[in-house]
């Protein structure tokens, strides 16, 4: 068990990059290392989160950005913070980085998004998953579009670039950022890389030799 406050890990990246699969793999990896972990997602499963999902295709721009931010503040207050205080590591599928990318694609200025989210809880580790735009487009085509952005053939390339910029924005705000290319690595390998990067010595020391890949400097 991890003593004291838990760690907050966010996973973001372009649609089709493997976020949900990686979140599950990371949950399994941390559990195997003896770390109490809680999975979550944005938009959340709350009433507000369900409203956002149901109306995502119709509400756009500044209005959608405000709803997403409201859902996030509620998410932090009612789910993330209580779990962290209980000593659990919280892993969320999408968080601030997704807002800084998706809402910019929707025409909302970065300055407005940063101001809107100025008081949200920052993660202990922000993971940005990435891959080649062509591979992302193939994955989206094979599974079918899930939202209006998937119908834009230029979206994967634009998302990759915006996530690169967002990684730099978060680092400027003193957030620890880990960028992982999922193009060649398996979800298990990606999960082990993320787990090793979490800024908590007890998590790193709990790793077994089999689950800890060699890391570069």
Image: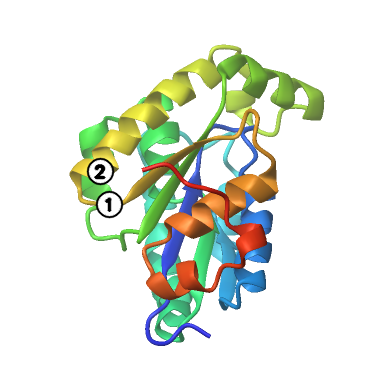
Residue 87 is tagged as none
Q: 142 or 167, which lies in front? A: 167
Residue carrying label 2: 171
Q: Is residue 46 visible?
A: no
Q: Is residue 8 visible?
A: yes
Residue carrying label 1: 175
Q: 67 or 162, which lies in front? A: 162
Q: Position of residue 52 (x, y in %)?
A: 55, 49
Image vertical order of residue 211 relative to residue 36, above or below: above
Q: Which SS class for mark 1?
A: loop
Q: Position of residue 210 (x, y in %)?
A: 67, 60
Question: Is 213 placed left or right of 81 in the picture?
Answer: right
Q: 68 or 137, which lies in front? A: 137
Q: Residue at x 71, y 26 (%)?
A: 140
Question: Is 76 placed left or right of 143 in the picture?
Answer: left
Q: Residue at x 21, y 51 (%)?
A: 174
Q: Position of residue 39 (x, y in %)?
A: 60, 65
Q: Residue at x 36, y 43 (%)?
A: 217
Q: Position of residue 13 (x, y in %)?
A: 51, 37
Residue contact between numbered discs 2 and 1, judged by CB atoms under 8 Å: yes
The part of the image, by quadrant, that contains residue 37 is bottom right
Image vertical order of residue 150 relative to residue 83, above or below: above
Residues packed near mark 2 inside 10 Å, few (<14), some (14 to 19) or many (20 plus): few
Q: Residue at x 61, y 72 (%)?
A: 33
Report the colour scheme: rainbow
Image vertical order of residue 25 relative to residue 187, above or below: below
Instruction: Compute the Cα span from label 2 to label 1.
Output: 5 Å
């Amino acid at each position: 068990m991890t003593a004291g406050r838990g760690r907050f890990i966010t996973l973001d990246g372009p649609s089709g990059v493997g976020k949900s699969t990686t979140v599950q793999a990371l949950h399994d990896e941390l559990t195997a290392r003896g770390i109490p972990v809680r999975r979550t997602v944005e938009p959340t499963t709350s009433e507000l989160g369900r409203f956002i999902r149901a109306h995502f295709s119709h509400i756009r721009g500044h209005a959608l950005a405000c709803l997403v931010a409201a859902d996030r503040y509620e998410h932090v207050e009612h789910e993330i913070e209580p779990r962290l205080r209980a000593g659990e590591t919280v892993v969320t599928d999408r968080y601030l980085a997704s807002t800084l990318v998706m809402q910019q694609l929707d025409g909302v200025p970065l300055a407005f998004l940063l101001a809107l989210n100025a008081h949200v809880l920052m993660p202990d580790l922000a993971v940005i998953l990435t891959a080649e735009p062509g591979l992302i487009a193939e994955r989206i085509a094979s599974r079918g579009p899930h939202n209006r952005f998937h119908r834009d053939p230029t979206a994967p390339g634009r998302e990759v670039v915006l996530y690169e910029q967002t990684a730099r924005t978060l680092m400027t705000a003193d957030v620890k950022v880990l960028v992982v290319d999922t193009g060649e690595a398996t979800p298990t390998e990606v999960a082990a890389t993320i787990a090793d990067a979490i800024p908590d010595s007890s998590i790193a020391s709990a790793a077994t030799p089999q689950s800890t890949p060699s890391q570069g400097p």
